[in-house]
Image (cartoon, helix red, strand yellow):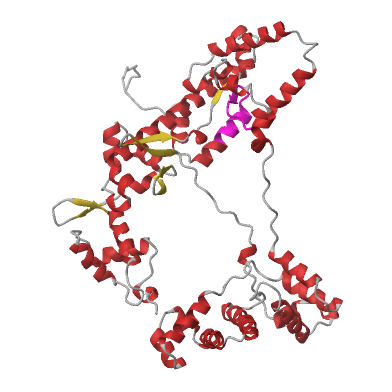
Amino acid sequence: MKPSLQLRQTQQLALTPQLQQSIRLLQLSTLELTQEVEQALADNPLLERLDDPLADCVRVAASGALDGRASSAPADDTASERDGETGDAQDWSAEPWDSDAGEQPGGERGADAGRTLADDDERDFPQLACATISLREHLGEQLAATHCTPRDRALVQLLIDALDDDGLLESSPAEVARMLPEELGVSCDELVTALRLLQSFDPAGVGASDLRECLLLQLGRRMGETATKQSPASLDALRLAQAIVDRHLEALASKDYARLRRALRCDDDALREAHAAIRQLDPRPGAAFATQQAGFVVPDVIARRVRGNWIATLNPSVMPRLRINDAYARILKHDRRSAAPQLSGQLQEARWLIRNLQQRFETILRVAQAIVDRQRSFFSHGAVAMRPLVLREIADALGLHESTISRVTSHKYIMTPFGTYELKYFFGSRLATDSGGAASSTAIRAIIRQLVEAESPADPLPDGRIAELLAAQGFVVARRTVAKYRESLRIPTVSKRKSL
């Protein structure tokens, strides 16, 4: 076969670096986007941000320095340099987020120029978080104020270091004694005495080996405090609670109240008082000294009611404001040949990042507004008014692909009058109704939660009864579907919801 040349015309989709960056930025959460922007600012000198938190400090320091040398610096030269920088910045401000409005007298920077240090007291002098004390430090302070021998003090400190974060001692005194060197001559009786001293410290229940001992220690201390107040009724309830924790803790966990009444030979009122006393105990006495901080979700979109209509707006606090650095832009403008070749590539990357960030937030706003338009009843009446919605419906309305809608709604949050929800929360499957229509699974879950919250604690609703109540309202839901939704809502079963 002879070699020959052939001309063939084909089409193929190529993912350019700019398109790849746009897709990656679209699926990032707010925290991941912030990290991505900070990394880009550190790697690319042509990028700078207008919302720099240190800008006020720099401006105050610069104004103080200018006040000190005002007599030696000619005003005309300073004004001419500032005007020149502004003119150069205008040539490189093609993107909407890459504007030089801050350089204008009426812009943001012009407004900030009149600020003084007194105007930003809270920002320049932030309040510091109070110092927290750990469980070991708290117990160590009590040990330091206790009169005991140095040997006992060392043994108690050894047991304090062996506690876990909940304040429990997983190893027994005998096991701790075996781990110590033999030349120390520490006996098991000495460790038991040190453990008794540790268990007398605050918080009550610290140093226990398991949940049962922890609750018994707390009940014993409460009985001693109640005895001094001479309250017989409270003492009887605490004694009954002590008997339940000591011998019938599993029956209490399974809420087998009939078995407890037969074993303890008590009535419902006494059992109810003992149960209330047990519920006031802390199964994790050391958890109060943990330094874990609760995380907060910053919404990307805010839903507001404007003249009877619900409007989605972007949260400005999560939108980084970037622009091209004036100094490097001026170098590339005046003499591209003498400038470093790397600057041209970094300039293009900076422009891509600014444009892709703008496109990211525009897409998020479009999708959020489309969701708000279709879920107006939710914003007015809550989850019970949620209508069924799928990704394809939003994709067809906006002319986007379903994968794009999935990226936009993942890890993006909207603030509503009923709380902050992920955008994926507003999508739900369809369930049939008696009238031939469809209801959202989210609305069914909300109704199930309302039914459980309104049920009688002594006679909770089983899954079959909940299905019957839903059918009475026109929702065709099977019992196993109710069980699945109840488990997704983390609602316990009937036996675990039952109380006296």
Q: Which residue: 55% across, 37% down?
A: 34
Q: Residue 113 is drawn in which quadrant? A: top right
* Above or below for 172 versus 480: below
**Residue 459 image offset from top left, x and y in percent:** 32, 76
Please indicate, yes or no, whether residue 357 appears anywhere in the rendered image. Answer: yes
**Residue 152 image offset from top left, x and y in percent:** 81, 78
Is 39 included in the stretch rendered in magenta? yes
Position of the N terminus, as image quadrant, is: top left
Please indicate, yes or no, whether residue 478 appears anywhere in the rendered image. Answer: no
Q: Which residue: 20% across, 51% down?
A: 438
User: Which residue is the extreme one toward the front?
Assistant: 230
Q: Which residues lie in the magenta part?
A: 36-53
Q: Residue 478 is drawn in which quadrant? A: bottom left
**Residue 12 image offset from top left, x and y in percent:** 35, 26
**Residue 433 image offset from top left, x and y in percent:** 17, 56
Q: Which residue: 65% across, 38% down?
A: 122
Q: Which residue: 30% across, 62% down?
A: 448
Q: Residue 392 is drawn in which quadrant? A: top left
Position of the C terminus, as image quadrant, is: bottom left
Looking at the picture, tell me which residue is in the foreground, 104 or 43.
Answer: 104
Is 18 included in the stretch rendered in magenta? no
Looking at the picture, tell me which residue is in the foreground, 433 or 451.
Answer: 451
Image check: 209 left or right of 431?
A: right
